[in-house]
Image: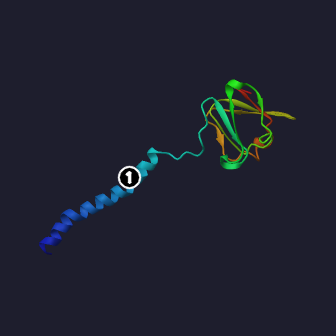
């Protein structure tokens, strides 16, 4: 084996291996450091509603300090998705049913669940 080959084996190959390992590990660590957000933000103290799934369609922000509110016509019995930044109680009046929602809760597809029956929202616990 010639002197150039010995130098390559001794110095370059370990360097290439180390760089290859770094290229594999860096993207994974960056992905772990910045988790993907699965939903849009909603102002603190509010619940944000959308008529469509995946946070599309007509939207409305309910603020906890406003107390009980009927859902707007476009969202009455038609909430496709929501993000909660406060505790709230979703209400269906006939028959009377409630769903407790906690700060940090969200649903991207809620229409086939209670979102298809919701009449109003109130703050706090049900």
Outermost residue, right side? 94
Using the rendered image of the protein, determine whether residue 124 is visible from the camera's viewpoint. Answer: no
Query: Where 72 sits versus 10, above or below?
Result: above
Quarter of the image where one finds residue 103? top right
Outermost residue, bottom side? 1
Q: Nearer the viewer, residue 117 or 72?
A: 72
Q: Secondary structure at mark 1?
A: helix
Q: Nearer the viewer, residue 93 or 14?
A: 93
Quarter of the image where one finds residue 122? top right
Using the rendered image of the protein, determine whether residue 82 is visible from the camera's viewpoint. Answer: yes
The residue that appears at 16% across and 67% down in the rendered structure is: 7
Q: Is residue 41 left or right of residue 90?
A: left
Way the structure is coloured: rainbow
The residue that appears at 61% across and 35% down in the rendered structure is: 104
Q: Is residue 94 left or right of residue 104?
A: right
Query: Where 58 sits versus 12, above or below?
Result: above
Q: Quadrant of the N terminus?
A: bottom left
Q: Residue 6 at what x, y percent from top left?
A: 16, 69
Query: Where 88 sits versus 77, above or below?
Result: above
For the residue carrying disc 1, how many other residues have a C-alpha within 10 Å: few (<14), some (14-19), or many (20+)? few
Q: Quadrant of the C terminus?
A: top right
Q: Residue 79 at what x, y percent from top left?
A: 74, 42
The residue that appears at 19% across and 68% down in the rendered structure is: 8
Quarter of the image where one finds residue 63? top right
The residue that appears at 44% across and 44% down in the rendered structure is: 33
Write down the residue under mark 1: 26
Q: Residue 72 at what x, y percent from top left?
A: 78, 37
Q: Is residue 103 left or right of residue 89?
A: left
């Amino acid at each position: 084996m010639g002197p150039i080959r010995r130098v390559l084996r001794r110095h370059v190959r370990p360097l290439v291996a180390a760089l290859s390992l770094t290229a594999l590990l860096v993207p994974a660590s960056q992905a772990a450091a910045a988790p993907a957000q699965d939903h849009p933000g909603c102002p603190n103290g509010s619940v944000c509603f959308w008529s469509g799934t995946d946070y599309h369609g007509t939207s409305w922000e309910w603020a906890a300090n406003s107390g009980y509110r009927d859902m707007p016509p476009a969202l009455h019995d038609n909430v496709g998705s929501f993000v909660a930044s406060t505790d709230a109680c979703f209400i269906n009046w006939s028959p009377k049913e409630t769903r407790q929602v906690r700060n940090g809760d969200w649903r991207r597809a809620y229409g086939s669940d209670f979102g298809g029956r919701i009449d109003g929202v109130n703050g706090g616990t049900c």
